[in-house]
Image: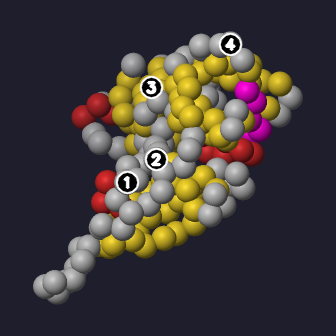
Amino acid sequence: MPRAKDLKRGMIIDFDGVPHAVKTIDCKSPSSRGASTYYKIRYNNLQTGTKRDESHKADDMLAEADCFRTKVNYSYMDGENYVFMDTEDYSQHSLSAEDLGDQVGYITEGMEEFNALLLEGTIIGIELPTIVTLEVMETAPRLKGASATNRNKPATLSTGIEVQVPEYLEVGEMVKVHTTTGEFLSRD
């Protein structure tokens, strides 16, 4: 059982028998002596997708959900569902675009070896890699001398998401994007 101060993004906590994933953690230090540190945590209900905000003292004990993590590969799209294949027993699991939410913009064909969360044999979510590589499909033309400045421009990537990229990037270049923040990291 983890303490509130030991929580990390992506951990699965059980509230009333329902698994919730830790999305954001905000630490509030006390302003007076003797007060305890509070952690304001946003959870995402893995069954309904709703958000839940909770505040915990640093030493509050929380129950970890009984989820099983398994390695999967993204296989294909079946109508509105994304199909993932377990790398150990080759079983297939599917999640709808609605269930995946914002993660849809980071799933590309041929993605390999990332975690899926299973609860009683049913997939309830996935844990994407921290960094994915995507192709720039649409952006403003490259500007001369743009490498000397630190300005950004919007770019549409191969999965349809839009990120801010440096002005010197062109259509067709591969870029690394942080899946948690949605920010451009570097050219690939």
Residue at (58, 62) in percent of width and height: 15
Q: What stretch is highlighted in magenta?
A: 93-97
Q: Is residue 107 above or below residue 23?
A: above
Label 1: few (<14), some or many (≥20) within 10 Å?
Answer: some
Question: x%, y% of residue 83?
Answer: 74, 24
The answer to whether residue 80 is left or right of residue 73 is right
Residue at (57, 40) in percent of width and height: 67
Dots 1, 2 in contact, CB < 8 A: yes
Name the dominant secondary structure of the magenta segment.
Answer: strand
Residue that carries the numbered disc 4 in the rendered image: 90
Residue that carries the numbered disc 1 in the rendered image: 2
- The mark found on residue 11 in the picture is 2
Q: Which amino acid does label 4 sit on?
A: Tyr
Dots 2, 4 in contact, CB < 8 A: no
Q: Is residue 45 magenta?
A: no
Q: Which of marks 3 and 4 is nearer the N terminus?
A: 4
Q: What residue type is labelled 2?
A: Met
Marks 1 and 4 sit apart, C-alpha to C-alpha, by 32 Å
Q: Nearer the viewer, mark 1 or mark 3?
A: 1
Return the residue nearer the eye: 37 or 75. Answer: 37
Residue that carries the numbered disc 3 in the rendered image: 175
Q: What residue type is labelled 3?
A: Val
Q: Can residue 111 be seen in this view?
A: no
Return the residue nearer the eye: 162 or 63. Answer: 63
The answer to whether residue 71 is left or right of residue 175 is right
Q: Nearer the viewer, mark 1 or mark 4?
A: 1
Q: Earlier in the sequence, mark 1 or mark 2?
A: 1
